[in-house]
Image: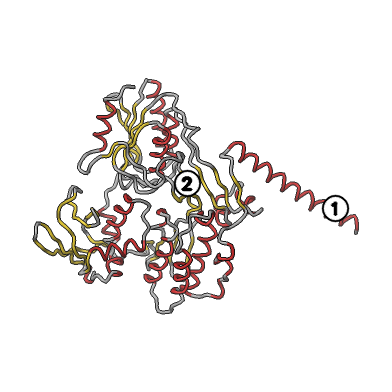
Amino acid sequence: MKARKKRSLKVVLISILALIAVLVTAIFILWHFSWRPTFRFSDNLGSNAIAHETLPDKTGFAADALLLVKTIEEVHPIFATDDWLSADYFEIRNEFLAYSQNPDITRTDFAFAATRYITTLRDGHMNMTLLKETDDGQWLRAIFGGRADISWLIQDEHLFLLDEGGALTETLVTEIGGVPTNTILSIAERYFYPENEADRIRMLSDISRLGDIIARAGGDTSGNAVTIALYEGGQESTVQVPMLSIEEIVAATPTFDFIIRYEMFDDIFFIHLRSFVNGDHITEVVHSIEQAIEDGIRKFIVDLRGNGGGASIAGQRLLEAMGITIPRFGAIRRISDLVAETHGGILPLLNFVGVDSLRFNSTTSTASNPNDVFISVLTDHFSYSSATMMGVWVQDGGFGNIIGSPSSNSPTNFGDWGGSLDLPYSRTYVSFISFTRWLRPDEDADPVTLWPDIMVSPGEDALDAALEFLRNLER
């Protein structure tokens, strides 16, 4: 019996020592070969965390609300530092939890309350991630209600119509569904967080067309149409605008038959990247870039206008094909149970020993450009996520310039898919929960906005501006 106990104890000790050895080795590898991380073993929420609540005590929408808050507080990186959390976070969180216990609220009411809570994270990537399941199994924005078939843009805190070519007109939108426009905009801004002014213009111009937003502000969208009041040149008028269904919106959305394509403009290698999707199509362009470098090409344009992001490795591969080594974004990454489960690798081990988060410092010291290439990156209000990241690599690394208008998310931002979440009672779905805070490589540069080096006015073509600039650039 004693011998058996000794053997068992020996096995336990060996297992513990092996675990410690694996952990130490993993930490050394991270430290030596990666960004030299700082390990944190505490959660700033402490006793304020909702994790101390238990789900069986809640039912219906209240259970969904509690599950959403618990998951976000366990996963999102905003809780990993002392100075990011907004002063009203706990107030809005507790209002959401209390409101969800009201037995008379609807799914749309719950969606608005949940979205209001999500704005406290100040995370543009999570703005549109709350989806609702339809009776036929489709997933739509939880806040939708159709979309007004009209195009407008915020300018100087007012909405102005756009013409068929997308140019700003002088026609002012004064009312939507019988409600003053500024009331509609204030409701839209209450439920969605803009990361910078470019994001605010892009997002609010779009969201103010949603039927649920108009109705929330007291506007009338009955009869699948909305009345728009207009003012121009001293004259007032109204127009009836149909509310488009999701099927009609999809049918009217322009489609593209490529993810990436390239062509030569004299000695300028032009790359048009529609989405950051890694694959054989990127490999093909990589080979062409490498051949162009061998042939003496040193001027490049990367068009990221309208690019909503994706896998940043696709952009990194294009730059590396030019011979570039990119500057490094810093990062703060939460190591939750959900992230450990979805990402694997060393994360489950770090999670097991209680590591709450890792911090990696940003640096521009890794940036190098041995081939002396020059890259002009084209951006607009619709450039987002990995598109912003690629522009930051080029600007912070000193590899070229940005031409166009500011992208609509911040160079220092929350992102990285940490997992998703089903809310069973409301049949809503959070498709993306961030677990990383990306930190801009150049700590002295603006963390909020990626400013173009050459700003292009509305009506001008950023590609024409880039071609003119590069044709006059000695390389």
Residue linked to disc 2: 438
Q: In x, y percent, where is residue 173?
A: 18, 60
Whether 131 is drawn above or below 364: the answer is below
Whether 405 is drawn above or below 204: the answer is above
Which of 243 and 89 lies nearest the eye of the viewer?
89
Q: In x, y percent, where is residue 209?
A: 26, 61
Q: Quadrant of the N terminus?
A: bottom right
The type of residue carrying mark 2 is: Trp
What is the residue that sits farthest to the bottom in this orientation?
103
Relative horizontal placement of residue 396, taking residue 345 as reference (left or right)? left
Whether 143 is drawn above or below 29: the answer is below
The type of residue carrying mark 1 is: Arg
For the point 28% across and 65% down, the residue is: 211
What is the residue that sits farthest to the top in this orientation?
295
Q: CA distance from mark 2 to mark 1?
A: 48 Å
Mark 2, secondary structure of its residue:
strand
Q: Tell me the crowding category of disc 1: few under 14, some 14 to 19, or many 20 or more residues within 10 angstroms, Cα based.
A: few
For the point 27% across and 39% down, the residue is: 455
Residue linked to disc 1: 7
Q: Tell me the crowding category of disc 2: few under 14, some 14 to 19, or many 20 or more residues within 10 angstroms, Cα based.
A: many
Q: Earlier in the sequence, mark 2 or mark 1?
A: 1
